[in-house]
Amino acid sequence: MNNSFFSKFTPKEPKFFPVLKEMSDVMLVASDLLIEFIRNYDHTTAAEYYKKIKEQEKKGDILSNKIFDDLNTTFITPFDREDINHLAGRLDDVTDYINSCAKRMVLYNPASMPPSASEMAALIKEGVICIGKAVDELDVLKKDAKKIKGYCQELHDIENRADDVYEHFIIDLFEKEKDSIEIIKLKEIMFELEKATDVAEYVGKIIKTIVVKYA
């Protein structure tokens, strides 16, 4: 696709970039809260942590809806409308999975959280930071795409590391945990954490698609 004509209009509609940045900031706050929640896990404080994370999830929904509304009222967009909408949706999904994990911790009330949960939460934060850096580069994509490509590769590597953590967790869980109810609880909580890293990697794939089209 020849974007030379399109590119002349790109600077006139920069409003999507700040909102996407806000969404990445929301993810970062949610990931920090999740790390704190897991490391200090106690049923007496679980509901309060979940409430804080839920507030971030609601902020993410509002920003995602704003992107959708702006797309419907903007004539010239910096990238394809579908790509912007897709990217915003997946950014929101990362926060949704963080929220879903916190919700399960409250509802299931496991006896304790395994060390691998902290590892996974730390990897989610790594991915979120990486996404934030990639989003920062979107408005200067045409000048230099090298950094953003590197961030996309980093997201892929983080997801691979998360897969390893999850697989080792499953092995240890079935070898060491004797309470079948606890197995179910922990497996579902860890699955939500793993899905958050999957979606973070998918964000990288969407950004790579944008790079191919416009860099």
Image (tube, rainbow, N blue to C red):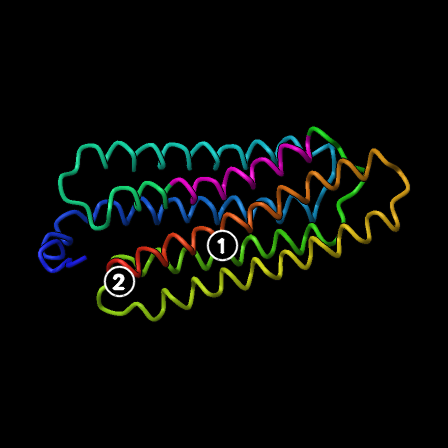
- Residue designated by label 2: 141
Residue 47: % across, % down: 65, 30
Q: Is residue 100 left or right of residue 87?
A: right
**In the image, is residue 192 above or below residue 200?**
above
Q: Quadrant of residue 40?
A: top right
Dominant secondary structure of the magenta stretch? Answer: helix
Q: Which secondary structure lies at badge 1?
A: helix
Q: Which mark is residue 71?
A: none
Q: Amino acid at mark 1?
A: Glu
Residue 21: % across, % down: 35, 49
For the N terminus, give its image quadrant: bottom left
Which residue is painted at 67% across and 56% down in the image? 119
Q: Is residue 215 left or right of residue 22?
A: left
Outermost residue, right direction? Answer: 178
Q: Is residue 12 magenta?
A: no
Q: Is residue 177 left or right of residue 34?
A: right
Q: Which secondary structure lies at badge 2?
A: loop
Q: Is residue 93 magenta?
A: yes
Residue 135: % across, % down: 35, 55
Q: CA distance from mark 1 to mark 2?
A: 19 Å
Which residue is painted at 60% across and 56% down in the image? 122
Q: Quadrant of residue 4?
A: bottom left
Residues in magenta? 89-106
Outermost residue, front direction? Answer: 1
Q: Which mark is residue 201?
A: 1
Q: How many marks?
A: 2
Residue 27: % across, % down: 47, 46
